[in-house]
Amino acid sequence: THKDQRQLDFEKGYRDLRSKMVMMGLFKSRPAFYVYKCISNQCLWLAAMVMMAVSESTVVHIGAALLMGLFFQQCGWLAHDFLHHQVFQKRKYGDLAGI
């Protein structure tokens, strides 16, 4: 297919922008961030479990359910990063962490 000059200019601009972002290090993984995210996510799970264990209140159980919803949502984003190999240099580690 034939691309017009406008499309070619857009693609060149995109490639140039991406090159600048790579040079700035914006695509480099920060291991400390993922350690923090995994620990904070486990804290969400733990807080929900404690809330369920220590209370029989429906309101507290609803709060625990909301925390579990947030926990699973965060698990999804973490798995997304792991399985797209954004975290580890070796693919097998990302695959294992994502699963």
Image (tube, grey):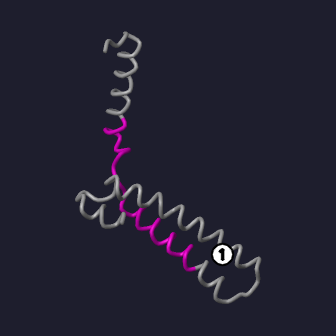
Magenta portion: prevailing SS class: helix
Above or below, 35 against 50 in this view is above
Q: Residue at x 33, y 49 (%)?
A: 28
For residue 48, above or below residue 81: below
- Residue 93 image position (x, y, % from top left): 27, 64
> Relative to 51, is 76 on the left or the right?
left
Q: Which of the 4 quarters of the picture holds residue 66?
A: bottom right
45 within the magenta span: yes
- Left/right placement of residue 96 relative to residue 79 reads left
Give the side of residue 49 with respect to residue 20, left or right.
Answer: right
Tag 1 residue = 64
How far from the left and from the top, in percent, is residue 89? 25, 57
Can you say whether 67 is above or below 82 in the image? below
Type of amino acid at the residue the image marks with label 1:
Ala
Residue furthest out toward the bottom: 54
Q: Quadrant of residue 52?
A: bottom right
Where does the image place residue 91, in percent across and percent down from the top left? 24, 58
- The quadrant in which residue 47 appears is bottom right
Q: Secondary structure at mark 1?
A: helix
Query: In the shown orientation, is residue 84 left or right of residue 66?
Result: left
Residue at the (32%, 12%) spot, across then down: 2
- What residue is shown at x 24% (from left), y 62% (from top)? 92
**Residue toward you, 84 or 38:** 84
Of residues 34 and 32, which is closer to you in this image? 34
Q: Residue furthest top?
A: 5
- Image quadrant occupied by the N terminus: top left
Q: Which residues are magenta?
A: 21-46
Q: Nearer the viewer, residue 18 or 49?
A: 49
In the image, what residue occupies the spot 70% across and 78% down? 61
Mark 1 burial class by Cα count in 10 Å: few <14, some 14-19, many 20+: many
